[in-house]
Amino acid sequence: MIMVAAMSALVVVASFGLFIDGRELMQASVWAKPLKFGMSFVIYGVTLAWLLPKLHRARRTMWTLGTVFAVTGLIDVGFIAVQAARGTYSHFNVNTDVFNQIGQVVFSSGVVGLFGASLLIAVMLLFQRVGDAALTWSLRVGIGLSVIGMALASFIRGWAATGPRTAEDAYGNSVTLLGQHGVGVPDGDGMPITNWSTVGGDLRVPHFIGLHSIQVFVLAVLLLTALAARISWLRSERVRAQLTGVVILGYSAVFTITTWQAMRGQPLVGPDAATWTALGVTVVVTALLATLAISAARRSLVVPAGDWRSSGAPPREPVGSSGPDRTVTP
């Protein structure tokens, strides 16, 4: 939560920077990247702070992993913020000034800390149950997809790289960059806010979708649990687990499709026929599975007329009846 507090402060500072600081890197404010990273770490940090105390096995190990993640996140995003204040690039910057060289070494090693801590938490979640089946599986699959999303970040440099290139920092000075976010196209021409490429593939799209899958899944569980107070067929743990599984399946398919799309050098906003087909199949299958689960749950509540065994309540005897077989219902 110390990390979350620091990231929240960065979000405030970066938000002001967007409006009062006119410096830009590749047609985007120098404060856009610190803002995005700060918001992402706030969301993920709060999730881990809520999750880790619920894991009752190896509590000391979990505390250590959470601390490693928090410290690494502070260092990594701190470097991004400092580079933004300096008006230069944090990612892919291979300039030879001493501060940048030291920062890049720390920055690169930090990815291992974030990925490694999350991976170990994901593995240990496989051997622990947290709440009901729906919540347990949403956490297991969610943090698993988050780890895969983090892993994609390490592929961005190798997959998208086109060799060293020269760019200008916020002051017009030359900066050498090795690697890029776009697949098949140079960085630039990005979407508003996210800055994801609009002319080529961008692995930041599935990286983001995978990283925050755990929040989507937990919100789905919370929504189903809240609706269970009003919808009788949702009160079954099995039904909620089935519907959560449908959400997980559909979301995982979207993650896979956007990864495939990016690796083919295709922008998120320019899907081809193959991508549309894959998305269409995902929507149809997800809707069908949800419909089947809901239909089966509603049928299970229907009690045939005269069959008291299905409801679990024996019939009442008429008032005034007597005898050894009389049933008294309080």
Image (spheres, helix red, strand yellow):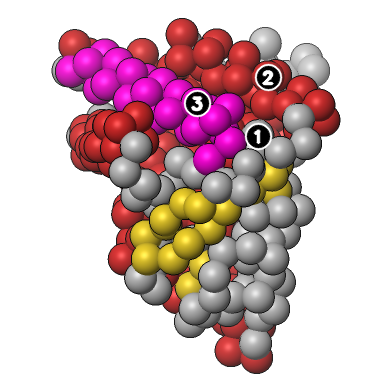
Q: Residues within 10 Å of mark 1 (few under 14, many from 20)?
A: many
SS assignment at label 2: helix
Residue 170 x %, y %: 63, 43
Q: CA distance from mark 3 to mark 1?
A: 10 Å
SS assignment at label 3: helix
Residue 187 x %, y %: 57, 64
Q: Amino acid at mark 2?
A: Val
Residue 13 numbered mark, or none: 2
Label whose residue precedes the other's in the sequence (2 or 1): 2
Screen quadrant of the C terminus: top right
Q: Residue at x 47, y 11 (%)?
A: 1
Q: Residues within 10 Å of mark 2 (few under 14, many from 20)?
A: some
Label whose residue precedes the other's in the sequence (3 or 1): 1
Tell me the magenta residue range.
61-88
Q: How many marks?
A: 3
Q: CA distance from mark 3 to mark 2?
A: 12 Å
Q: Amino acid at mark 1?
A: Trp
Q: Amino acid at mark 3?
A: Val
Figure check: 262 above or below 290: below
Residue 144 x %, y %: 35, 47
Figure check: 36 above or below 175: above
